[in-house]
Amino acid sequence: MTSVETPSFTELEAIAKRVRRDIIEMITAAKSGHPGGSLSAVELLVGLYFDQMKHDPQNPKWADRDRFILGKGHAAPVLYSVMAECGYVPKDQLNTLRQMGSIYQGHPDVRFIPALEASTGSLGEGLSVGLGMAIAAKMNGSPSRVYVMLGDGEIQEGQIWESAMFGAFHKVDNIVAIVDYNKIQLDGWVKDIMEVEPLGDKWRAFGWHTITIDGHNPSEVRGAYIEAAHTKGKPTAIIAHTIKGKGVSFMENNPKFHGTAPSADECQKALAELA
Amino acid sequence: MAKYELKLGPATREGFGRALVALGRENDQVVVLDADLSKSTFTHLFAKEFPERFIECGIAEANMVAIGAGLAASGKIAFVASFSAFIMNKGFEQLRVTAAYPNVPLKVVGTHSGISIGEDGPSQMSIEDLALATALPGFVVMAPADDSSMFEIVKAMAYHPAPCFIRAGRSKASHIYNDGDKFPVGGSKTLVEGHDLTIMAYGLMVAESIRAAESLAEEGISARVIDMYSIKPLDDEAVHKAVAETGAIVVAEEHLVDGGLGVKIAQTVASATPCIMEFVGVQNRYAESGTPESILDKYGLLSRDIINAAKRVLTRKK
């Protein structure tokens, strides 16, 4: 992962498809979990771990590594699958998700996977933790960058805007907030629960360089991460328009699959679509 | 009986500020975060000498706690400070998820604890902080009684591997200890020997307890006084010894009696040998504005109240 080889979009798309299959199989085996918001974030995470982040699965505590925090911790399956693809954690145990004794806890838990950067699950806190890590890197003269993925529902938490104000004021330009803007939260559509628009204007008003992309387009994802890395003097927010449940026709844009596991039948149908 | 002059010295928050400067000079990994109260918490002393390692967070305690956790998780010795009422209540969820649960060794300091802050009134008074802090699995909770014990405890806790909460006060504290004294985690300090009963206290109530013991001695009552500066872990040994050797305990604390030191001591006592106890503290209510002296008087936190509790406990002991 520390190599400078740039993977082709075809390679990234192939990884993304495997990750989607993992997500479906893991959550089906667990009989509970959050497929929709895991599937919406696949390209964004694959683009980080296989393309943009400097990290080393053989040396997970490498001081100058780039760091990723999954603020929306309920999308743990996508993170577990991507980390398994990288070799941080065993792929053959992914289907123990949410079982007693499994390292694949319901939400990311550093006690079980030390290669995780933070335990998350209580929404709104990951961006603050990431800012602390980004500041520590700057103090140490490290080139380390920090990426924090936020849910669009998560940004209804007030602490997000405390941290947004802080990041711009302290010119923390080695942090990137990625909003997985899939438009759906547990109780329904974001616009009906608590509208977050005008979203780009909000981040810009808080002093963040703001990039809006299609979060399923590997080229746009790569471009946004590169633009963020070249942005100096202010933090960057990437507003990634995504589709909840992306890749499985009957899960796409379906609030039911925010937090419901597929049945065995649905699992087979989903895997057939992802063949 | 040892005599204590109990001359008023600096507030415990001043000992905190002094310790931060000492730590900053000996270790360049020490960082300090504050939420627009640095002149009150005394972190301004550190900010002045080490501006590059002082992080102003504005009035946003929840964010500050989680940023501090991120720094601590990255290997920094991170202190976050505010009024105890704000950092514990507004930051509690962040202390739970970003420090306690992942066992990140964040150092949390709450000043202006208790009701002795006086005129500012109940919104600024922290009377629930120890109940909250001790509820966090893995947290070490310390409540020093004076400037020197605060100085030593802050310096020691900087290198302790667990997350911790240290409780400081606003008002001047009676001088009891000297710089260089040691305050191990899980320990206590027996300041007055006695055999009729034991008074256990922390913070400002330690000096009040010594005064109470001196008055009781004039009436022929021998009261042991122990500074239970380590609220969690508790010095169970000192508690068991007090039960065995004195058979009666009065707990005196500037905190709600619910969820405070008294409850923890009662739990230790009840799980071994039951013992008669009395509890001096804030009783299921909020205080009000006033001079610190008048508030401590009205809400029952003076040596007089400890003496009365001692007499009650002795009557029940007979």
Image (tube, coloured by chain):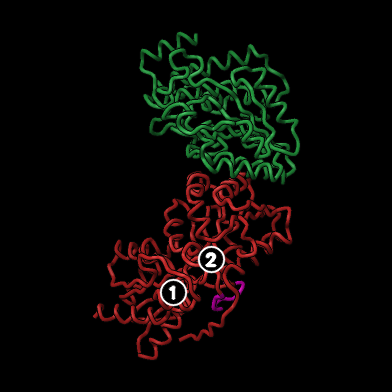
Chain colours: A green, B red
The main secondary structure of the magenta stretch is: loop
Q: Position of residue B275 (x, y in %)?
A: 29, 70
Was residue B214 drawn as part of the magenta stretch in this picture?
no
Q: Is residue A90 visible?
A: no
Using the image as rendered, state which of residue B10 and residue B282 is in the foreground: B282
Q: Is residue A208 left or right of residue A124?
A: right
Question: Which chain letter goes with mark 2?
Answer: B
Does label 1 or label 2 sit earlier along the sequence?
Answer: 2
- The crowding category of the residue bearing disc 2, from other C-alpha atoms within 10 Å (few below 14, some 14 to 19, many at least 20), is many
- Residue appearing at x 55%, y 73% in the figure: B171
- The quadrant of the rendering that contains the C terminus of chain B is bottom left
Q: Which residues are magenta?
A: B172-182
- The quadrant of the rendering that contains the N terminus of chain B is bottom left
Indicate the secondary structure of the residue bearing disc 2. loop
Q: Which residue is mark 2?
A: B112
Using the image as rendered, state which of residue B198 and residue A163 is in the foreground: A163
